[in-house]
Image (tube, rainbow, N blue to C red):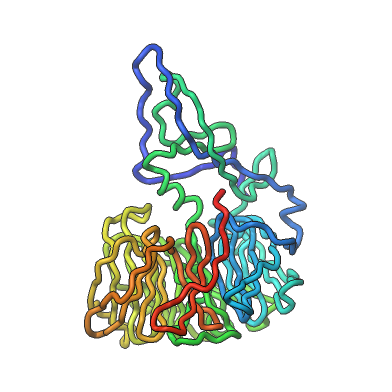
Amino acid sequence: MKTINYLLITITGLFFAGSCVKDKCTQTKEFTHYAPVYITQAEYDAPVEYESVRPMENTGTIFAYGDYIFVNEFQKGIHIVDNQEPAHPKPLGFIDIPGNTHFTIRQDVLYANKMEDLVAIDVSHVEQPQQVNRLKGVFQLNRAQTSSEGIVAYYENTHEVVELDCNDYRYSSVMFAFEDGVFVDQGGFNSRMDYAFATPNLSAAAESSSKAPGTLGVGGSMARFTTIQDRLYILSDFLLETVDISTAKKPAKMGNIPIRFTAETIYPFGSHLYIGTTNGMHIYSVSDAGLPEHVSTTAHIQSCDPVISDGSYAYVTLRGGTPCGGTTNQLEAYDVEDPFNPALLQTFPMENPHGLTKVGDFLYVCEGNGGWKKIKSNLPGPFSTTLTNTNHSAFDVLLTPRGTLLFVGKSGIYQYSLEGKNPNLISKLEITLP
């Protein structure tokens, strides 16, 4: 662990303006206040706990496993939802995991980060999850922060209105630290802060078939945890961690390899991992013997970059106007039949693309606040949009083992039936915005 006195945030391109030169003036400004919530060392060391249902407020990774949906509450834990009746999903409870941001599930064991540690949780009895193991110090870049108040578990945000004198240094500041919290002006920079504090969403990737296997489970395309056979692979910014899970309840760290540029998402298909970074798509081969081996890198302009694959083609969304950099918004398709030499086949303009999945011959691509699109994959021919849905926001999407689509939006998790020509909304899990 490392000691801190204040929350440190580095954001490229953020500048603080000087003080006003007027003698007397005031201004009322609205800020989002990010305040740390502390836990004790005993609470940090304790096994995870299963609690009663709590509201979804700031969701991240989503994962469908058998008849259940698991949803990360950013930095707090994981919601469990009974999805035996997709038209009537029922929240069951909550696994309290301080500092949790990502997870995946394989063979009835849920693997999740608890700050810098990896915890293994038996979910074979889904309403009685039990922690069965814990590996210390797996995520060195996510080490717990401590102060005289205790260990920072997460940050709560509240909206505050402050009247400031023009000679106050905060008068013209976009962001400032005060005591042990951070205040962010709710002006034009707000969307970037939302991204920095609560990037969602992601777990194993969705299959391209119309019915996903229930024994493995499926997750969104924004994943940072995934599994292939008896290996758990975890992205940790510039590192790819490998964990042996051949004995599911006794994970053992095998080692890590460096990843060029900032790694964002990981997607498994066959014996390969497809890794999206801010500067390109990387393909790695995996085996039972050791750590993944680099196969190829395909560079693209700097941007946020989720990637999925069906083995023949890889699909990448590039999103600009974020801390990842760049201004391009488009869908790209690559021929990856020869993973050593991926070839760009085409680009397709988008508005604000986020996560995506493929079901049969169709791609479902999230457009952020602009909803989502159903796109016919005519490869090697051109893409064509067959449906645009703007009824709700969408940031990630997955195909459940029950053959339904789940879209994660700002105010809810939306489930669609695929029985007709086009997806039909059948249920919504409410997300209560804080």
Q: Is residue 66 above or below residue 412?
A: below
Q: Nearer the viewer, residue 206 or 97?
A: 206
| Residue at left offset 55%, top offset 42% | 34
Left of 74 or right of it: where is 22?
left
Q: Is residue 376 above or below residue 326?
A: below
Q: Nearer the viewer, residue 309 or 42?
A: 309
Left of 114 or right of it: where is 355?
left
Quadrant housing residue 314: bottom left
Where residue 339 appears, x then y in whole percent?
A: 33, 83
Where residue 82 appears, x then y in whole percent?
A: 65, 74
**Whether residue 348 can be seen here:** yes
| Residue at left offset 51%, top offset 72% | 415
**How many discs mark residues in the rendered view?**
0
| Residue at left offset 32%, top offset 83% | 336
In this view, which residue lies farthest toward the top?
Answer: 23
Quadrant housing residue 354: bottom left
Q: Nearer the viewer, residue 243 or 383?
A: 383
**Whether residue 258 can be seen here:** no
Where residue 81 appears, x then y in whole percent?
A: 64, 70
Where residue 263 appears, x then y in whole percent?
A: 42, 64
